[in-house]
Image (cartoon, rainbow, N blue to C red):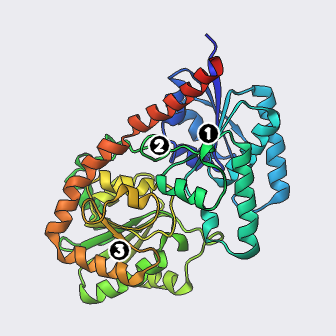
Amino acid sequence: MNKKKLIRITTVPQSLIGLLKGQLRFMSENGFEVIGISSAGEALEEVTRQENVRTIAVEMTRTISPFKDIRSVWKLYRIFKREKPLIVHTHTPKAGTVGMFAAWLAGVPHRLHTVAGLPLLLATGKKRKLLDFVEKMTYRWATIVYPNSYGLYDIILQNKYTTKSKLKVIGKGSSNGIDTTHFNPDLIPEEQKQQLRNSLGIKHNDFVYVFVGRMVKDKGINELVAAFGQVHKKYANTKLILVGGFERHLDPLKPETEKEIDTNSCIVAAGHQKDVRPYFAIADVFTFPSYREGFPNVLMQSCAMGVASIATDINGCNEIVEDGYNGIIIPSQNQDKLLEKMFYLYENAEVRKQIAEVSRDLIIKNYERSYVQNEILNEYHSLIKEDNV
């Protein structure tokens, strides 16, 4: 029997490697001929090896670039006409726009787009109007749109980007779930944790706050660094470990924030790390004061690693974390509340312990990767079944 052809697209290959890790291989092993499409580079070659699927490079930008976008649409259109996929499924904003347009032009039967966040919500003026228009068109070209959280579902409807009939949340949310057999604190031996502490200058009695993610304004880094400065003044044995790369060309931090990171010896910028588990393993508290999210993998990872978390009251975060039960929820862009809860978790060891004890079990129950991937596979099968009715 011929396999149904499925094309998955992200703007950059790192999203295929990280955000959708294992999913292309899973679909390939369960009846689909899978092709991954993203921008060129070594990371795309890694997708081919990691997922054991065919990949095709198509350059896509993350910025507003009309001429480059038209070229991307044309290349994708030609690929779709040649490959004749049954399903094209896009992730990330730009891949969604150019991918859905090209798939619509090529007459692909099932044009699916997953929404994992809406950066445009922070835009204003003419730029916001343009981005709103593009978002509406992306959803119009798609046959189904999958918000990866119920909060995003509501936001999409509130902004009138599309109608209820086109929207669906798969499972309980998340684009790919979490592999809790990998994100397991028991896998990080004490010797490895001690080596990492030594390399970061963390002493035995230090209290460690950790952030994992992109080092940008939208992740709340300005507020986090400023709040930590106040925490450290009161409690000298505190450390802040920042795990992630800077994106100064897209969403830079304040100059004073970067200066504080550079000059404060108790703040460690660890950069991008392929394996973030050891950093969670040495953390007392995970701080995640993000302005916007879809369904944040990093927060699920933190919970799966049994770390007490502080996260903002935004879609995705407030679905993963129930305030006071498996984490702490604070208002977004509120440095004072962030500071208050950083103090609170420092001063209340029993609360940290209670949160940590329930966090992992909830992730296993609701967001285990195998469950999420099977739900997506079932969705694909339901589309095929409808075709055959």
Residue type at mark 1?
A: Glu
State if disc 1 and disc 3 touch (CB < 8 Å). no
Q: Is residue 202 visible?
A: no
Q: Position of residue 291 (x, y in %)?
A: 50, 70
- The residue carrying mark 2 is 176
Classify 231 as above or below 46. below
Q: CA distance from mark 3 to mark 1?
A: 35 Å
Where's the N terminus, which quadrant?
top right
Classify 127 as above or below 385. below
Q: Residues within 10 Å of mark 3 (few under 14, many from 20)?
A: many
Nearer to me, 102 or 268: 102
**Residue positioned most to the top:** 1
Q: CA distance from mark 2 to mark 3?
A: 29 Å
- The residue carrying mark 1 is 45
Q: Residues within 10 Å of mark 2 (few under 14, many from 20)?
A: many
Q: Is residue 388 visible?
A: yes
Residue type at mark 2?
A: Asn
Mark 1 or mark 2: name the one nearer the start of the chain.
1
Disc 1 versus disc 2: nearer the observer: 2
Classify 304 as above or below 204. above
- On screen, residue 221 versus residue 341, left or right, reads right
Disc 2 versus disc 3: nearer the observer: 2
Residue type at mark 3?
A: Leu
In what element is the residue under mark 1? helix
Where's the C terminus, which quadrant?
top right
Q: Residues within 10 Å of mark 1 (few under 14, many from 20)?
A: some
Nearer to me, 28 or 51: 28
Nearer to me, 358 or 51: 358
Indicate which disc residue 240 carries: 3
Q: Residue at x 54, y 71 (%)?
A: 218
Classify 31 as above or below 294. above
